[in-house]
Image: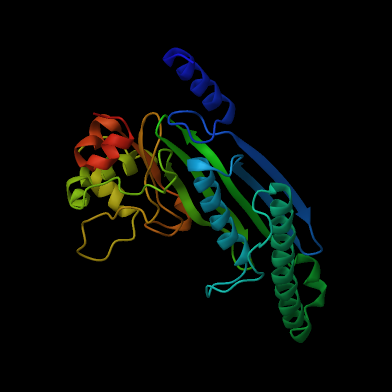
């Protein structure tokens, strides 16, 4: 076989597998599940690489671990588990999805019934049984899905909305997770160690746009009026969630209550690459192909 034939054959295999060849889109499949229990509602949207080999297989394995951590701890705040990790054939995605959708649904229903019975007992003791119909249902909506893919990397969103009782629900999870398609590992080394202080102006600008503050000299002061900052502290921190790249720039998202009131939502903004590049690590510049 000639060198040209070898190249054509290799390219054909790469296009067919779509599982580990550098630059090829990673073939995925999405699974959607919804369940309505007696006292709860549960939904489950999962997107996984099809291949179990190479970089795609490594990404798939890590996504399954993330799903396991999220769904097995529904209703818990102590690092415990509601059910054990799936120990079957990891390549059997249908069985895997059935296991987590079923057990996740059971976990939220268990919590919901405990919550209902606790409130019910309180109402009975307080002679307010006529208000039983107003006891809210619990809800858990889980999403783990691809949001962006480029030549070198792929980004998945890990997010859930949960209402476990109380004033309101909330969003949790890991946010956007960037995987290096060259090795399948999570990449989170985007910003230089000293970038925070130097990027304050860009963070202020992004938050001003989110809060719809007017441009001008008072924008920074206006932004800070919305934020939870200690007295005398003028530094706006980076979000706890790792920033993530897309076609336009690096995205930053703060969680509810992280820097502002719940009513302010999840402050987010994108810093274009030409503005954020001076603060990126050499590894990030290589991954993002910004040389």
Locate the C terminus by quadrant.
top left
Q: Residue at x 50, y 46 (%)?
A: 59
Residue 129 in the image: state x and y as whole percent: 81, 77
Residue 178 appears anywhere in the view: yes
Residue 202 in the image: state x and y as whole percent: 25, 41
Against 91, residue 70 (above or below) is below
Q: State left or right for residue 65 relative to residue 229.
A: right
Residue 211 appears anywhere in the view: no
Camera-side residue: 158 or 23? 23
**Number of marks in the image?**
0
Q: State left or right for residue 156 relative to residue 271.
A: right
Against 83, residue 102 (above or below) is above
Q: Residue at x 55, y 31 (%)?
A: 18
Q: State left or right for residue 232 relative to residue 211.
A: left
Query: Which image quadrant for residue 285?
Result: top left
Residue 157 in the image: state x and y as whole percent: 51, 45
Q: State left or right for residue 108 relative to residue 275.
A: right
Camera-side residue: 218 or 161? 161
Q: Residue at x 69, y 65 (%)?
A: 108
Residue 7 in the image: state x and y as whole percent: 45, 18
Residue farthest to the bottom, as pictured: 125
Residue farthest to the front, as pictured: 1
Q: Residue at x 28, y 55 (%)?
A: 237
């Amino acid at each position: 076989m000639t060198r040209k034939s070898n190249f054509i054959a290799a390219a054909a295999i790469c296009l067919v597998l779509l599982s580990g060849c550098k630059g090829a889109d990673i073939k995925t499949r999405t699974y959607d599940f919804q369940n309505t229990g007696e006292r709860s509602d549960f939904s489950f949207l999962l997107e996984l690489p099809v291949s179990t080999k190479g970089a795609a297989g490594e990404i798939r394995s890590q996504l399954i671990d993330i799903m396991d951590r999220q769904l097995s701890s529904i209703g818990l705040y102590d690092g415990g588990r509601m059910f054990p990790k799936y120990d079957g054939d990891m390549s059997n995605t249908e069985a895997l999805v059935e296991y987590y959708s079923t057990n996740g649904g059971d976990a939220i229903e268990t919590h919901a019934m405990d919550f209902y019975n606790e409130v019910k007992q309180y109402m009975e003791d307080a002679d307010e049984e006529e208000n039983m119909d107003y006891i809210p249902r619990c809800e858990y909506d889980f999403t783990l899905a691809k949001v962006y893919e480029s030549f070198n990397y792929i980004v998945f969103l890990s997010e859930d909305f949960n209402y476990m009782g109380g004033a309101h629900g909330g969003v949790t999870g890991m946010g956007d997770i960037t995987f290096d398609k060259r090795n399948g590992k999570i990449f989170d080394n985007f910003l230089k160690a000293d970038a925070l202080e130097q990027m304050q102006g860009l963070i202020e600008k992004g938050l001003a746009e989110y809060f719809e503050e007017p441009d001008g000299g008072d924008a920074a002061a206006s932004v800070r009026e919305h934020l939870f900052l200690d007295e005398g502290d003028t530094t706006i921190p980076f979000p706890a969630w790792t920033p993530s790249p897309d076609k336009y720039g690096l995205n930053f998202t703060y969680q509810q209550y992280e820097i502002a009131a719940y009513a302010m939502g999840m402050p987010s903004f994108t810093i274009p690459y030409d503005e954020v590049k001076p603060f990126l690590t050499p590894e990030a510049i290589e991954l993002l192909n910004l040389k």
